[in-house]
Amino acid sequence: MTAARSNRGETAMTTRIGVLTSGGDAQGMNAAVRAVVRTGIHLGAEVYAIREGWQGAVDGGDGISRLDWDDVGSVLHRGGTVIGTARCREFRERAGQLAAARHLLEHGIDRLIVIGGDGSLTGTDEFRRNWPDLVAELAREGQITQEVADAHTSLMIAGLVGSIDNDLVGTDMTIGADSALHRIVDAIDTIASTAASHQRSFVVEVMGRHCGYLPLMAAIAGGCDYVFVPEDPPADGWEDDMCELLRSGRAAGRRDSIVLVAEGAHDRHGTPITATQVKDLLAERLGEDTRVTILGHVQRGGSPSAYDRWMSTLLGYAAVQEVLEATPDSVPHILGVRHNRIAQIPLVEAVQQTREVARHVERQDYEAAVTARGASFGEMLAVFERMSRPRRPSNPSRRRRGSRSSTPVVSRRA
Ligand SMILES: Nc1ncnc2c1ncn2[C@@H]1O[C@H](COP(=O)(O)OP(=O)(O)OP(=O)(O)O)[C@@H](O)[C@H]1O
Ligand SMILES: O=P(O)(O)OC[C@H]1O[C@](O)(CO)[C@@H](O)[C@@H]1O
């Protein structure tokens, strides 16, 4: 490898970086890809798109192609991912990973930037760990030369979290979460006007299979009445609690009621709570004219917010630096956001902590799940609780989750 120096004096090895988007698409992925390509070129590297997620690496051929500066023009404002994404089954198997390694090596790629959710990042780390063995097998079987094998003994990776769910522990925000939240809140505002006109109730299903970030933040931002999230199911008897809350809202003159249900919502015993079930309950018990709206993939579509564009640009920029500086001994990192700054987060740890939340939920240890999700998640639950439960002199507020009643949200200087 030869050292190259850009006109800004930045030094980089002449090397080839692969970039791919994997798992569910997310608004802002294009901004990240654009930043990777342009930063890579600035630093003297060649950047290759691996198309349709890991499928492009498994298939080879047109699945891997070089991107130049202009190839990523006019993509910043576009939703989705222009290099395609997929959930690729073959890559989970050794045969798929062998094919992927062979195709990457055909292009001399041994540095990868992967933009995807926790599954994609887990797969990336698994591939990194398997890489020496895969390369050795390819050389043994004569599928690559020993010279190629010797030149690419390690795979260097950097991860960016592309997922609207904002479900990765360790980063404050993931690529797409802000845009999806805007999309949901726009929908709630739209629904609220028709709900108020007819004095109806709406039950809105929001994405996030295992993570309550989107429904919870949308409930706060949209001024909703009740929210169901997977990490903090309502106490037993929630049916009475919810109906009483909505009934008292009506009695106080509220013209619309909106309940948000995460697609992965369930009660404290793990029994799913669906939007239709909530609708039927409101209709039966309160006689409410109730409608269900499932927002679905509308939440993932459309152009990215300004935040998702600039944040993803910074992340892509940082990811190139990370992957160029990485050595075979480096701890693999995710680039994320902490306290409004780009931060390096150990990949394995972040994925393990994220899985831990799901495990707590499975074990029905919801206090641990909320804690593991991160400090601000518990704070936001407490804030929602306060905002959605009217306190009137004649009607002292009844808390659903007593322990969070005085959760502080201000960080104090020591
Ligand atoms: N353990 C694994 N080993 C190898 N590859 C994996 C592994 N887990 C996931 N992948 C790869 O990553 C792809 C995407 O994973 P997954 O469907 O879990 O989505 P994700 O990245 O978590 O995104 P989203 O948040 O949108 O669900 C899989 O289809 C597969 O190609
Ligand atoms: O597009 P698909 O494959 O149906 O996946 C939907 C899932 O992907 C996400 O949008 C992102 O993880 C989830 O919120 C949702 O459950």
Image (cartoon, helix red, strand yellow):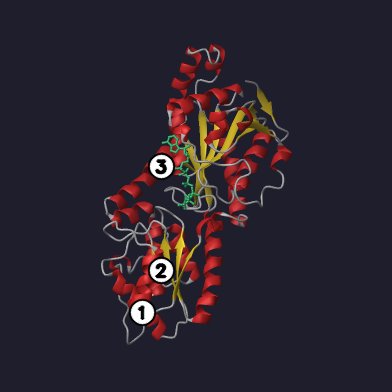
What amino acid is at disc 3?
Val
Quadrant of the snapshot with the N terminus: top right
Residue type at mark 1: give it.
Leu
Look at the numbered disc 3 and give the secondary structure of its residue.
Answer: helix
Up/down of 54 relative to 397, above or below? above
Which percent across, then down, holds residue 380? 41, 63
Which label is found at residue 286? 1
Secondary element under disc 1, as helix, strand or loop, is helix
Which of discs 2 and 1 lies nearer the camera? The answer is: 1
* Mark 2 closeness class: few <14, some 14–19, many ≥20 residues within 10 Å: many
Give the number of the mark in front: 3 or 1. 1
Label for residue 384? 2
Q: How far apart in space, not on screen, are marks 2 and 1 (Cα)?
A: 23 Å
Foreground pick, 369 / 252 = 252
The structure residue drawn at horizontal position 37% and vertical position 82%, both measured from the top left corner, is 248
Read off the residue under disc 3: 351
Q: Is 128 placed left or right of 144 in the picture?
A: left
- Residue 227 position, x and y percent, is 40, 66
Q: Amino acid at mark 2?
A: Phe
Q: Residue at x 60, y 31 (%)?
A: 17
Out of 27 and 396, give the one closest to the viewer. 27
Residue count near mark 3 (Cα–Cα under 10 Å), binned few <14, some 14–19, many ≥20: many
2 or 1: tag closer to the N-terminus: 1
The percent coordinates of residue 119 (x first, y second) are 44, 41
